[in-house]
Image (spheres, coloured by chain):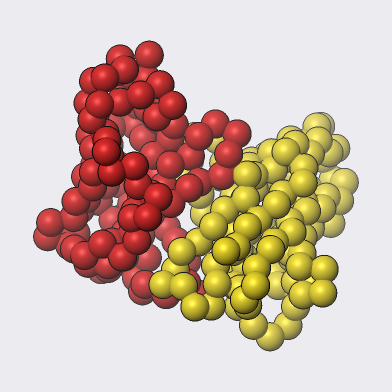
């Protein structure tokens, strides 16, 4: 079975500061990895995904994530955040073998201070 | 391209009452999912359809929850009777392929409050 741990339930940062949202996963098989964002009162939308190849993945809105197989991590980063990045961020995994059973972490709420 | 449509956006009911949520996926998307998102938690898969067939309903509480996708397009999720712990946002998502490399497109969700 797979599981996802997002260690930080809330991350407050100042505008234009860098941010890292942490994600660790557990799986006995190879997985695909995703980050989704949920803006207030909206559905989730895909930020980026890692399927294979380069371990550094770039997504929308200036976000990027790095897959680290040895540490089973997929941390999300942005060098300079904006007020508009205020949202909840979910890390998700799915095993190669699954017919697309995607498992989500509990989420990290990013709040940006002016 | 129209997104995933869900209704109603909000519903308040008393425990032991019934409720139904409707979802219309993006045109051409064969795979449809219902997720339950309890406050402070990540979405939890309830059921996955491929066209009008069920692929995975292992986490659906079948004594009270039911879902159908009769014509392989829109879907209905029903709860009867509702319990207090069913208070959550019910998210519908769709994807073109059934594959896990695809991107899920989510609706805005239906927020259920059970009193």
Q: In the image shown, does B71 or A2 lie closer to the viewer? A: A2
Q: Residue A45 at what x, y percent from top left?
A: 52, 54
Extreme residue in the left direction: B71
Which sits in the foreground, B100 or B3?
B100
State which quadrant residue B58 falls in. Answer: bottom left
Q: Position of residue B31 (x, y in %)?
A: 31, 65
Q: Quadrant of the rendered structure where residue A78 is?
A: bottom right
Position of residue A23 relative to residue A52, above or below, is above
Q: Is residue B62 left or right of residue A54?
A: left
Residue A91, above or below A55: above
Q: Colour of chain A?
A: yellow
Residue at image point 36% right, 35% down: B110
Q: Is residue B19 above or below residue B115?
A: below
Q: What residue lies at 57% left-to-right and 64% top-to-bottom? A: A1
Q: What is the display colour for chain B?
A: red
Query: The N terminus of chain B appears in which quarter of the rendering?
Result: bottom left
The reply to whether residue A7 is visible in this rendering is: yes
Nearest the viewer among B5 and B67 is B67
Classify residue A36 by image quadrant: bottom right
- The answer to whether residue A65 is left or right of residue A107 is right
Q: Position of residue A32 (x, y in %)?
A: 59, 72
In the image, A19 versus A27, the foreground residue is A27
Tell me if residue A83 can be seen: no
């Amino acid at each position: 079975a797979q599981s996802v741990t997002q260690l930080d339930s809330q991350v407050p940062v100042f505008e234009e500061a860098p941010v890292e949202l942490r994600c660790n996963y557990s799986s006995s098989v190879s997985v695909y990895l995703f980050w989704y964002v949920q803006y207030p009162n909206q559905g989730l939308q895909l930020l980026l995904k890692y399927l294979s190849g380069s371990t550094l993945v770039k997504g929308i809105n200036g976000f990027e994530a790095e897959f680290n197989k040895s540490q089973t991590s997929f941390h999300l980063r942005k060098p300079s955040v904006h007020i508009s990045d205020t949202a909840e961020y979910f890390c998700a995994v799915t095993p190669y073998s699954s017919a697309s059973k995607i498992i989500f972490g509990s989420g990290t709420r990013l709040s940006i201070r002016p | 391209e129209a997104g995933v449509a869900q209704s109603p956006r909000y519903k308040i009911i008393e425990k032991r009452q019934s409720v139904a949520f409707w979802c219309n996926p993006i045109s051409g998307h064969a795979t449809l999912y219902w997720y339950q998102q309890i406050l402070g938690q990540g979405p939890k898969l309830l059921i996955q359809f491929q066209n009008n067939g069920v692929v995975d309903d292992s986490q659906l509480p079948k004594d009270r929850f039911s879902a159908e996708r009769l014509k392989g397009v829109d879907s209905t999720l029903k709860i009867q009777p509702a319990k207090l712990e069913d208070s959550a946002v019910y998210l519908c998502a769709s994807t073109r392929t059934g594959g896990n490399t695809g991107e899920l497109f989510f609706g805005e969700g239906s927020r259920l409050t059970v009193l």
